[in-house]
Image (cartoon, grey):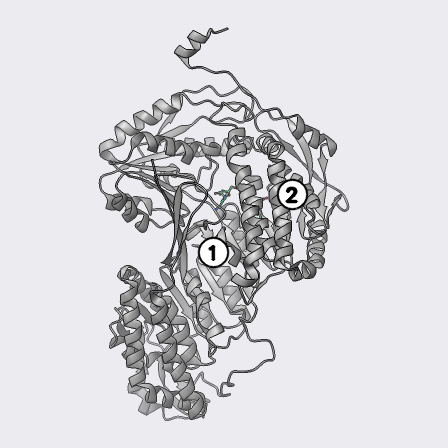
Amino acid sequence: MSTVAEIFDTMSYGPAPEADTAARAWLASHSGRFGFFINGAWVQPQGEAAYLDSRNPATGEKLASIAVASPEDVDRAVAAAAAAYPAWAKRRGHERARVLYALARLVQKSSRVIAVLESLDNGKPIRETRDIDIPLVARHFYHHAGWAQLLPQEAPGMVPLGVVGQVIPWNFPLLMLAWKIAPALACGNTVVLKPAEYTSLTALYFAELCEEAGVPPGVVNIITGAGETGQALIDHPGVAKIAFTGSTEVGRIIRARTAGSGKKLSLELGGKSPFIVLDDADLDAAVEGLVDAIWFNQGQVCCAGSRLLVEESVAERFLAKIKARLANFRLGDPLDKCIDMGAVVDPIQRSRIDQLVSQAESEGGRVWRAPVTCPPAGCYYPPTLITHLGTANTAWREEIFGPVLAVMTFRSVSEAIQLANNTRFGLSATIWSENINRALELANAVKAGVVWVNCTNQFDAACPFGGYKESGFGREGGLLGLAEYLKAKHEWLDVGEVRLPSPPAVAVQGRVAVQAHAAELIDRTAKNYIGGKQMRPDGGDTRLVAAHDGRAAGRVGVGSRKDIRDAVEAAFNAEGWAKTTAHQRAQILFYLAENFSIRAPEFKQRLVELTGVSPAAAAREVAASIERLFSYAAWADKFEGAVHRPPARQLALSVHEPLGVVGVVCPDPLPLLSFVSLMAPVIAMGNRCVAVPSERYPLLATDFYQILDTSDVPGGVVNIVTGASDALARILAEHDQVDGLWYHGSPEGSRQVEALSIGNLKRTWVNGGRDRDWFSPATGEGRAFLAAATQVKTIWLPFGD
Ligand code: NAD
């Protein structure tokens, strides 16, 4: 027994465990065995039931048996959600707002028992579940109750999607549920959600809150199980959208399996995020930041700052401070309010961490483990640093998803940027500096969806969260998050509604159908346009292009893999375009429109000749194309981000950034207008474009070269490769230097683009064989195009001391 005087000397303190009586009583009320929550009631699995054990990772104790949903169970849940959808979608926004508000209130009223249940099931400290996870869950439901109320006015013309399938990971079980369910419900969708197999308990508890809050039966359905259950859900034809948070590996599987299905998809995936400490940083604050970045939730955080980049001049001092801090770390019972770190989620996860650390060591990394005592039983892993790394080391490249920090130093800001971006991921970045100019320079340069300046791991329901590159696509939070659960009512022309002039029925391939006056066209072979130059197709192949009456109108190149590669390289090298000011891009687009106007009569003539439309229809298409360039000249400096005021003393800025290199595969109808409508928003937002023009009428795009040449568009910003659209689309989809791909063509072509884009998880936008009304400003231009041409970076800036 210590005396008070001794305690003043040592500052030691004993355990302060949170009682788990209420949480255990709830488990007992279900006899420790759970079925599914379908159509507002608890149901048992159909047929031969299988169960998984849900265990407390801190002790290994079994907490409950969790049923594994079979495809038949998934079917039942989707059917219930589909039956509930029409009435829920029709409810007034205010009625949905009341339900979401009731959920927010109930989460607050049950916060203690939920926090304890989450700690028991996941192993994370009660301090975190109590002070971070559960308050953020409540905040999410409040915020989205507000959106349900406002959406009819704030998102006119937008409608819900239908049944949404949601699959979530184990690291923030209830928080990820809230991120998924709140926006889906606010928009009028119904939901089937599958929590992770290790951590289903709080989702099951939430099911009961739904009953109490008056969520109508079938609007929220919770099914449990492992990967096969998740797969059955994403494969289900009754699901209109998949929202997935989890590993990049499974994200890729989901992208491939949903290809061509028309299901909307958002993927929040893994990360390997840099934590950058400049020499002018407040080092003590940065140490605390780092603790929150990589030892929060035992490092099992998608956006964990798992790669420390510290400026060489302060590296030694900074590492000494970290080691001193970690030497006093407390590992232990997650329900103890005095611990810093709890248990990792499962023995499998612990051995995976161990194996990756050993591998990093065998590759030359030097491993330092904090001298802390791990409890003898349970799934604990000490805070760990790995130094002496090269960029090829496993610890630097791979997501370890545990309390392990990879350390490297740098000498200049440019080196820090280069190292920070040297990763296939792009979820988040943290920058520590007392110099706001340097910090913002870095924030601008890092390729990540979320950037924290002098803070880390901050989240809020109003602030977009999501990744660049292989960290996925789609955002959660605020209006952008809601966009993932809505669609435009009139984006596509209805089946059978033919408002476009029919293209002439002529054969365009081969010489047979084309009347032979080809000899005179030898000098009229349109080449590809790459890097601002006309380039002969690599294979030397050309083909005749027919006019509407079957006469030969000219020759074009037949683009190959090599031509696409050259075009992508030229586009990649034209990176300067992304850094030009929006004002400059606007001027160039206006200038393009001006030069196009001068040549309007020629284009009109060409349209008549090639497509057989009337002179009046051709004049209308040319005029609309010129006007479209004006629209995007106008938009270039107006599609701006937002400033958020999260509840803490911070500002969060969401900024639109270009994707990079975007492939654009254009349709045949309205070949000039559709080409301009797809190319212009891409470059207006600072992307570089590789366009594959209409396969049938490529000459309209090739005639456009001269306008590009005379309008100050830098070489490589627009590249045009003619040829077989679907073959070229496949090459673009497989190319890992292409960051986005827009495809307008057949349903099968759309499927291929989505299925083949999994290499770098590029952002795809396909038409699924549908037509749009290109003339209408509501569907042929505007925010949907601009949003597809950009990705949002959210930069968090604290203020005050
Ligand atoms: P995981 O991908 O293994 O599992 C995630 C979920 O997908 C689980 O519910 C699992 O049962 C299910 N699943 C597994 N295989 C499936 C399949 N073939 N089809 C459909 N569903 C399938 O990931 P995890 O180990 O549970 O979680 C850790 C990963 O999640 C890490 O990579 C982490 O970075 C990522 N994560 C990302 C975010 C984010 O917002 N970006 C947030 C949290 C976690």
Q: Earlier in the sequence, mark 1 or mark 2?
A: 2
Q: Is residue 774 visible?
A: yes
Give the answer, above or below, for where 86 lies relative to 367. below
Mark 1 lies on a secondary structure that is loop
Give the answer, above or below, for where 505 lies relative to 482. below
Q: Quadrant of residue 639?
A: bottom left
Name the amino acid, label 2.
Answer: Gly
Query: What residue is disc 2 on?
Result: 225
Q: Nearer the viewer, mark 1 or mark 2?
A: 2
Q: Residues within 10 Å of mark 2 (few under 14, many from 20)?
A: many
> Looking at mark 2, is its residue's CB closer than 8 Å to ligand 1?
yes
Q: Residue at x 33, y 91 (%)?
A: 519
Residue closer to the observer: 773 or 49: 773
Residue 467 in the image, given as x and y percentages of width and height = 43, 50
Name the amino acid, label 1.
Answer: Ile
Tell me how far mark 1 sits from mark 2, CA to CA.
25 Å
Numbered mark located on residue 758 in the image:
1
Give the answer, above or below, for where 752 lies relative to 776. above
Residue 312 in the image, given as x and y percentages of width and height = 24, 34
Give the answer, above or below, for where 263 lies relative to 621. above
Q: Quadrant of residue 82?
A: bottom right
Q: Is residue 185 left or right of residue 289?
A: right
Q: Is residue 466 left or right of residue 163?
A: left
Residue 732 in the image, given as x and y percentages of width and height = 41, 64
